[in-house]
Each structure stands twice: as structure tokens, then as C-alpha cells.
Amino acid sequence: MSLFSFTDMPAKLERLGGRIANAPIWESDFVRAVAAAVAVLLLAIVIAVPLDLVQQSVIAVIAYFAASKIRRLSWGRGGILIMVGISLLMTLRYLYWRLTVTLEFETTVDAVFGYLLLFAELYGITCLVLGYIQTAWPLERQPVMIDRPTSEWPSVDIFIPTYNEDLSVVRLSVLAALTLDWPADKLRVYLLDDGRREQFREFAQSCGAIYLTRDNNRHAKAGNLNEALKRTNGDFVAIFDCDHIPTRSFLQLSMGSFLRDPKLAMVQTPHFFFSPDPFERNLETHGKVPNEGQLFYGLVQDGNDIWNASFFCGSCAVLRRAPLEEIGGVAVETVTEDAHTALKMSRRGYNMAYLAVPQAAGLATENLSSHVGQRIRWARGMAQIFRIDNPLFGPGLTLGQRLCYVNAMLHFFYGLPRLIFLSAPVAYLVFGAHVFTATTSMVLAYALPAIVLASMTNSKIQGNHRHSFWNEVYETVLAWYISMPVLMALLNPKWGKFNVTAKGGKIDREYYDWKMAVPYVLLLAVNAICAIFGITELLRGSDEPFTALINCVWVVYNTVILSASAYVANESRQIRHTPRIKATFPATVSRANGRTVVCETANFSSTGLGLKLPKDNGIKWDIGERVHVSIFRGEKESTFPGTVQTGGQFVGIQFDDSLTLKQTKELAKMTFGRADMWATEWDKHTEDKPMTSIKNVVGHGVVNLYGLIRSGIRGAFVKRRA
């Protein structure tokens, strides 16, 4: 199938074959093609028309106020598309002007810095356009209920791969999988242990799971899954990372789509994390600012879905066995085996679906180093796919699928462009290079509207999935570390190896990870040098004061972003192996004196509960007191023995270490496995307000810069005394 083929091509051919004659003229494919050509021609004219400073400024002001007005109106997706159109108009006008007017450099230094900046800008504009295509109109797919008797439901194998994780991390995932609402004779849970540990074998046998292992670790996780495929025969395969705990309703919500569409090969659900990632914990933004992954699982995958381009993310997904076996199993050519597997199935003409309803939850990375390591693997894997199985070429994909896959891969190429933007003021302030052969006023007249309108439009599209300016922090933290792996993967896809992301640890003390922070500190130093040069030039009377001032403002912005990014390396203390999750369930506590106290949960974990009692209850609690806690789900009640750890209006209960497997399974079902457990917490962040966001980022930057300087002085002082 050619590059410009579409999934609805048979229907189009049918219309051309006969029924088109009876359709209104505006439904004619020929008329639509002519209209599209005219629209493109008019757009090209508007983009290319030359304007002077005043005219361009007037157009920019009109565009800004039009977009601002539309942003405040309740026009739904139609309003978003108009904003996208305005943003693209100003962005493409800037790009045309940039390419045709500003590249006549006078010196080699000007040319080097100028073309580096142009490269970064071209990358950013490409991602902006592809992002609009990808996210402007998400599908918002709804679950399909199963309308067949249970005797006709297909069989499902649950795969839970593990390598070096502790049993305490894996235990609840396996037990929760065993409680899924699915006919018992059609559900099998497999613990795939690449660590070949006897303790895991004994656990699987004791709880009713099936233990599988192999005598090698070839192809890491992909090889582990493929070995299990050879030794199982379920109609479908559901895959969970070993720290992801599924809810009881996972299969009932995800399987209905397969029964309706025989060409559907995969249903992916979000990765939801009940513990804060390093950004949320170290910057104290958990529950206030959407985390790094929220944009992808909250919007991007949903946007992919309308193009039939949602892809497998390695966990929390169901795959039809036949298509998976047809492509030779899980892909092993790259370290992002999940996305590559989906790409292969899409090339065979199978459909993909994304259901934006969290039906499992897991642990986020504990510290910055493990978080960076995970992202390096993702970046290297996407670059490998781009190199050896580029979605722009080859058979089987529609244009929409190609663009969505390419954008997913290009996203991880941001390292070098981001570093260029962070060090760009060096060009003028230190070396005196002119990266634009145009006046500063003309640069602002063309560039500023494009930047502001893109920010406004993305804020409208992304809403509560990503707050403005926080993406700058996320990308800055990772830019240095992913740049080289991506470049190496492009040069030689075989370089590098699969690394497992550690989960379930703790941080005993607060410390600053100077090793991870070195790139940010160096970039801060570069911008500090630029600031000194800029201030010196302004004070002595620069020949180009406006240009110097703009570069100084750029330095200030970079410093704020870099200081906020650098402080992510300030690892805060985390003493719990099992994070507490806020949740309110009906509960009662039965005491040794026979009294029962009615209350509700405030939080829970795999090892205990926090209970909220009525105010002024007058109840006295003895630390160490033995109690039995009952948790309710509808009319269902489950009781667990425990010990009082803290007393008062909020009572902390620790479960007995001697909970039986049956009790632990029941605990998972009543807490982590509740059908609505994660869906009620999904997408609950406040709507993005750009001015509030930039204030928060600046606040973090200023405070964290002070903290960074203080940590550095303290560290140097301690080292000197030692």
C-alpha cells in the first residue's frame, strides 16, 4: 500500500464506482481535492507575502486577539482547530521568513551558530505540526460491553514478566491478576521469571499461578514473553509489568472491543502510577502538576487512536494471539519491543485501540538516575526503530499512522535541539555572532507571535494533561543524557543493551545527586558567563542594546529552567517500601474489648491502613493494640488483623505479617483491585493557566537556585573540613 493510502479506500472506490453520481457535488472526491488544492495555494500565498515591520506587527496582534477570544469561548474541537490554523499560519510565516531572509551570514562563526539554531528551530516546528495532527481531535473511545454469555468468552493468558525485582513488588500484581472478573476456566496467570528463583516458583505454586522460566536471558523482556507464547495457547494475552496491579474489571472493560472487531490486534490502557516520580517528589508537585507521562497517556495515545496508530506500551494491554504470532512474536530487534511490535502488526493491516480508563497501577521510578536510565532506553529504542524500520517507508501504513509513529520517534530526538536552545545566548553575548541577518525588531515581529500562539494553542489542546512551561523542565533534565544514545542508535542500531528499571526501593536520607546534576550545573555556569558578558555590554553602552537585552532575557529564562531542572537531583527522603495511596472506603475497627468503631479509610498500602474517625469521638487507642479492620465494597466485607501504630482522629493500622495468601489476595481485591480505584483519580488536575504555570516554574527556579547554591557551598565546606 502506498504512502498516501487510507483505511477507508474500499469505501472511496465504491463511491467512485457508482453512487457518487447521486451525491451532492460537495461530496465529490474531485471537488474536495480541488478545494484542498485551492486552500493550500491560498495558505502558501498568505505565508509568503512580504510585510514590513508595522504590517507584520498588525497581523500578529490581530492573530493574538483572535486566538485569545476563541480560547475563552466554548467552541469545543472546532475552536481548537481554528486556533491550530492561526498558530500554523504564524509559525509557517515565521519559517518562510527565516529561510528566505535571515540566513545571509557574514562570518563563519555567524554561520555555525546560525545553522545550529536553525536546526533546533526546524526540529521544534516539525514536532509542533505533527503534534497538532496527532492531538487536535482525540478519539475518546468508550469501553464496549460484552454482550455474549460467559460460555462464549475467549480464553486469556496473563503474562507477568520479572527479572531481578523483589517478591514484595511482584506479589500483589500476581494475586490481583488471579482475582480478575473472568471465567476461571478461561483465565491463566503466568509468572515469567527470568531470574530463575526458587522463592518465586514456590510463591506461584502456593497461590495458583503458573511458573515459567527458561535457561537463558536472550532478548531480555521480549525473549521472556516470546518463550511464554510458545508454551501457552490462550486466545488472548494480557501483559503487565511485575509492579503493575490490575483492577478486577480490566478484562471486562478491554475485551469487548475485540469481540466487536475481528481485525483488532491490541487494546492499550494507561500506565497509572500511585507513587510520585522524581520530578513530583523532589519538586513537591505531586497531585498539583500533571506528571511527565500524563500528556502521553492522557492525550497523545487518544489522539493516535483516531488515526488507528495507538501503540503497545509494554504493560496494561491485551493482544490477540494470532496477529502476535503472525509477526513472529514480540519484536526483538530493538529495546523498545512494545512500540515495534505494534508497528509490525499495523503494517499487516490490523487495528489498534486505546482505552483511556486506568485499569492498573504501578510504581514510578524512585530516583532521578533510574528515571533517566529508563528514558535513555526508550530514546535509544525509538531511534533504533527509526533507523531499521522507519514508519515513513515500507508497506502497510496509512499516512496518519506514519505521521503518528514518526512523531513518537522524533519526540526522543529533542536532546540536541534542547541543548542548543539552552546555550544559544553564547553566540551573541560571548562570541558576538549574529544568528539572524535581520533587525531585532523584525525577529520579534515574526518569532514572538509564533511562540506565543503555539503556547496558547497547546495550552488549549493539552488542558489538564500538561501545564505550560513544565515540558521545558522535563526535557531539560533528560536532554544531556539522551542525546548521545539517540545519535549512537542512529549510527549503529546494535549498540547498547536492555536495562531493567529498578522499582520498590527506598531513599533513607535526603541527598543531592551531584553526579546526575553535573550537566545542569555546567549549563548554568555557561548562562552565568553569558549574563556577565551581557550586563557588561549593556553597562558600557552596546552598539546593539536591544539585541543584548533580548539575549539577557533569554539567559534569565534559561537560568530559571535549568535551576528548576537541577534541583530534581535533590533526592528527598523516602522511607516507605510501599507508598500510601489516598482513598476513602467505608470501614470498621473491631477492638479486643468487643467495641466496633465505624470509620472510613484515609489511605492504604499493601502493609497497612490509615483510618479517619469521627471528630471528637473520645476514643483512646493504645499503641500496639490488636484490632480487626473490615473494609467494605458495596455489600462485600473483608476483615484483616492488624496492630495500632498511631492513635487519635487518624489511626494508623499495620497489617499482620502473618496474613495468609487468601487474605492478601482479598486485600488486593478490596483495595488496589477495585474497579473504580484509579479511574476516579485519572485526569483530575486543574486546567492549565499559562501565567500561573510560568509563575510556579519561576518560583521553583528561584528557590531551587538558592538551594542549589547553598548545597554547593555546604558540600565544599564539608569537603574542606574533611
Image (cartoon, rainbow, N blue to C red):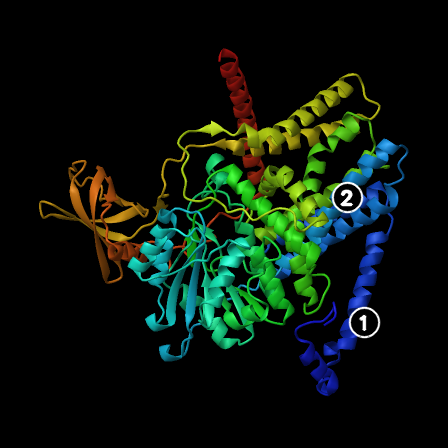
Q: Residue at x 75, y 29 (%)?
A: 426
Give the residue type that dot 2 points to: Phe
Q: Is residue 682 above or below residue 252?
A: above
Q: Which residue is drawn at 23% across and 44% down?
A: 613
| Residue 264 in picture, x, y percent from top left | 54, 72
Give the residue type that dot 1 points to: Val
Q: Give the image quarter of residue 182.
A: bottom left
Q: Which mark is residue 119?
A: 2
Q: Residue at x 51, y 19 (%)?
A: 715
633 on left or right of 106: left
Which residue sits furthest top? 721
| Residue 245 in picture, x, y percent from top left | 39, 55
Q: Is residue 698 above or below residue 178?
A: above
Q: Regarding mark 1 in the picture, which secondary structure is present there?
A: helix
Q: Which of marks 2 and 1 is nearer the N terminus?
A: 1
Q: Residue 470 carries which label?
A: none
Q: Would residue 421 be visible to someone looking at this image?
A: yes
**Dot 1 corresponds to which residue?**
34
